[in-house]
Structures are given as structure tokens and as C-alpha cells.
Amino acid sequence: MTTPPPGSRKPTIVTWQGLARTSLEQVRLFVRDGRLRASGRLVVASEAPFSASFEFTAARFGDVGRGLLRTTAADTERQVSVRRTEDGIWLIDRGEGVERSEFDGATDVDVAGSVTFTALPIRRLGLHRKMGEAELSVLYIATPDLTVTRVRQTYRTVEITDQGAVINYRDAYRDADIVVDTDGLPVTYPDVATRL
């Protein structure tokens, strides 16, 4: 994929295969006027099998505006919607009333096991185009139970190449150098997934 031109661009589909577990993730990405819409599915066949479907919209500068995530396991079905207001309040709705929280200023969302969400802060910060580093407060959605917490994640540009960049990702459990393309989308994520 190439850097999107200003304005609109045709939708594209990206697929990743899991490395540490048997899984596939496929997402349809559409960029228009600087906004990104991601609609995808994650299927996990190993451990406790489940599937997840998601639709998220990122605003002009990459921060998540709203999203819906559903998971299905053998004995349960769950869903959660998240939305960030203009004044930085997250609205979390599981169909039983809305929870309101700032989540320590989080602007990004990460969904456990999904490669798609790794790209959002990289794109928002432009780390695939210029050297930089940022420690972020992130809204973290666990799968398949869809609990929502706040975590700290660090992204740092290691190298920029003609094909994209290498971004170091670090949190309390993982330290990995992720290879991304010129759009900031992961190509290889060590021990997690590789793009097909």
C-alpha cells in the first residue's frame, strides 16, 4: 500500500495470520478526508476459541472517535461500544447503562489480540514518517470478555525506510520491533502476527 493522497482513497483489505496462536484477522480500511474507518474480524481457533468483529472510526488526527466490538465464544456473546466525546470523556456502553470516564486522558484504543489497533497510534503520531517516541495512556479492551481498562504503552521509531518503518512497541508484558508499511500498518509483529 502507498501513502494515501489528500481527500479520498479506495478501501483496502488487509489480512494477518497469528504466529503464537492459530488466528486470522482481516480488516477493511477506508480513509477519506483524513478520517480512517476500520471494519474487521478476528478469529482465534486455539486456546479458548472465539471470534470478534469490530467497527471503529478514527478522527482526522488518528484518535478514536467511536467503535463497536462484539465477541462470540462457545457459551457467550458480548458487545461493547466506546465513544470519546470532544471534551475527552469516554462513554462505555454494554447495553446496561453508560459508564463515563476520562481513562487518564486516553486517546487511543487497543483491542487484545488485534493487530489493526497497533496501527492507530503509529498513524496518529506519524511515527512511520518521522523519528519520534511517545508514552501513551490507552483504552484497552480485553477479548473475549470485553473488560475495559487503561494501560500504558510506548511507541518509538527505530528506523524509517523506503518500504515503511520499524517501530518499537513496549508495554508491561511485551517489547517488540514491529515492521510497518508506508501507511503505518504492521507487516510483521514478532511472535504475534504476519501480514498475508
Image (cartoon, grey):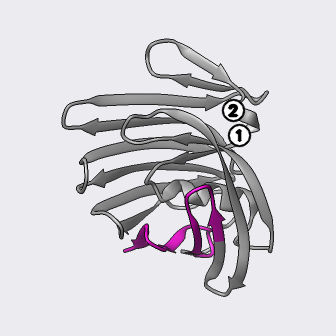
Disc 1 versus disc 2: distance between alpha carbons?
Answer: 6 Å
Q: Answer yes or no: is residue 178 visible.
A: yes
Quick check: is 62 in the magenta stretch?
A: no
Nearest the eye: 141 or 151: 151
Q: Residues within 10 Å of mark 1 (few under 14, many from 20)?
A: many
The residue positioned farthest toward the top in the image shown: 97
What residue span does the magenta drawing correspond to?
168-196
Residue at left offset 56%, top offset 42%: 140
Measuring from the top left, give residue 54's x and y in whole percent.
Answer: 43, 42
Measuring from the top left, give residue 173's x and y in whole percent.
Answer: 55, 58
Please give the residue where the numbered disc 1 appears in the rendered image: 106
Q: Residues within 10 Å of mark 2 (few under 14, many from 20)?
A: some
Quick check: is 172 in the magenta stretch?
A: yes
Q: Answer yes or no: is residue 6 visible.
A: no
Please give the residue where the numbered disc 2 appears in the rendered image: 103
Q: Is residue 29 left or right of residue 196?
A: right
Q: Is residue 141 left or right of residue 107?
A: left
Count the marks: how many? Answer: 2
Nearest the eye: 138 or 33: 138
Quadrant, the C terminus = bottom left
Measuring from the top left, give residue 93's x and y in whole percent.
Answer: 51, 21
